[in-house]
Image (cartoon, rainbow, N blue to C red):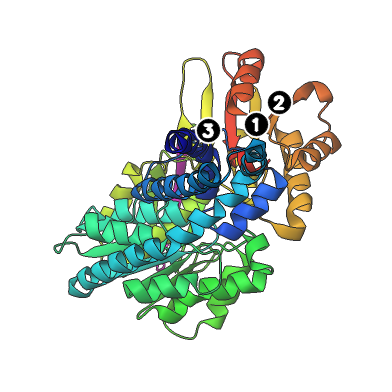
Amino acid sequence: MFIVYSIINTIIFTIYSLFFIKKYQLESYKIKSYLKTLLKNPFSFGDKNDLVFTKRIKRLIFIVFLASFLYFFLIFFFIKNIYIFIPLALILVFYPIFLVVPFVLALPIENLIKQRFILKAKKKLKAFSGKKIGITGSFGKTSTKNFLYQILKEEFDVCATPKSFNTPMGVCKSVLENLKETDDFFIVEMGARHAGDIKFLADFVGVDFGILTPIGSCHLESFGTIEKIEDTKYELCEATQNWVVFNGKSRSTKKLYDRYKHQKYLVCEKDSYAYAENVLSSEEGSSFTLILDGQKFDSKTKLLGMANIDNIVTASAMAYLLGESVYSIVKGIEKLEATAHRLELIRGEFVNVIDDSYNSNFEGFKEALKTISQFQGRKVVVSPGMVELGKVQQEQNNLAGRLVGETADLFLIMNETNKAALSSGAKTAGMTDMQIFYANTRKEQQQILKQILRKGDVVLFENDFPDNLR
């Protein structure tokens, strides 16, 4: 009978474990980060996100099941009296911490699988005869990658890492599933949370050309100082075999441009190798003059915001340097599609939506507010603010709140993390309590929006992040 009891309890607790496994997944399978968020918010399960049942998660659930079964089997086998409630009560209370055991047990298995995939991808990359382009920075990476991909496709066969795939396993997946022998270029987005992350990716891929997008305080909490962020991003420059294009719209990127002593190109600054002038923007899109290597070309795009134009200029400069004709570049610019969740305009019969929910930096927040100001109708901003900014988090969210107060008519603040800083900033700029709303889940968000929205409003979703950070 004790086996039946063991199985029943194991099934119940394995189902219960899914809430915490999701938290572990949201923390990128980092045990230290999992424990940290567990101590802060033990029963906040990330209501905005679903557990993604990847092969890794399925393996982990199996190990959790085995570990739980062993625990309950030993309890029911050795304890036959009233005291059995003591270990049962302990596992009920400490189960989220108990899960660290199967998490640790799974790590060697995952590392072996990871190494196998890396070796397989390395072999394919070694045989690849095309050129490889690495892109890193604090923000604008994904959009620049997507724009370069779309522009180069006018004349070349191109492969690029999809969505925001910028980790070793994401790059491996792209290499093994998408990269073809006949491709001329492979564009790789590279992300980092720790020193050495970019170096690993760059050495793994074997970068021929590099792009450095603007660098800011994203992940300052992980790195500690802006100098460490700069050094980590600079790892791409050190690994690049040919030239590097620097988007000069941040002080840190210009600093690294000056530091780099090999072939390099500065863009997005007046009189630099490539930049835009005569920019005209509206809710219909943008037109501008593209200055490229001293030549002028009239260009237009349906994309919104100056940040997108800078990303277009950066991508155009690299395409031109790689040998694409200006005719194809201008044609490609006109056909560009917005990157999902990054100043993406979604037109509706009732309201227009600007989806900038994958943005997570102050400069991007400012740009999104400039963009929404170009629209007719009431402006409604929905945002939880910005995270992982370390000591400057409260200050930057307070400034962001002020900008919202100066630009928008209504402000819906998501979650608790930056609630005080955002609302304080908005009120400093003149917003009243009647204009500021609060929600902790998407369900609450939807209910509030149904109540406050009117036909013709424009809604900006800025810097969305999981509920488990509240």
Is 323 placed above or below 418 here?
below
The quarter holding residue 194 reads bottom right
Query: Label 1 belongs to which residue?
Result: 381
Q: What stretch is highlighted in magenta?
A: 285-295
Residue contact at pointers 3 and 2, CB within 8 angstroms:
no
Q: How many labels does the image show?
A: 3
Label 2, on which residue?
Answer: 410
Q: Where in the figure is residue 12, as x and y percent of width and height?
A: 50, 33
* Residue, far left: 182
Residue 391 versus residue 4 in the image, above or below = below
**Kind of residue sitting beneath label 2:** Leu
- Check disc 3 and give the amino acid type: Ile
Query: Mark 2 or mark 3, which is nearer the start of the sequence?
Result: 3
* Secondary structure found at label 2: strand
Which residue was labeled with disc 3? 354
Residue at coordinates 37% horizontally, 50% vertically from top-left? 59
* Residue at x 71% of width, y 47% of height: 40
Q: Where is residue 249 in the image (x, y as percent from the top left)?
A: 57, 61
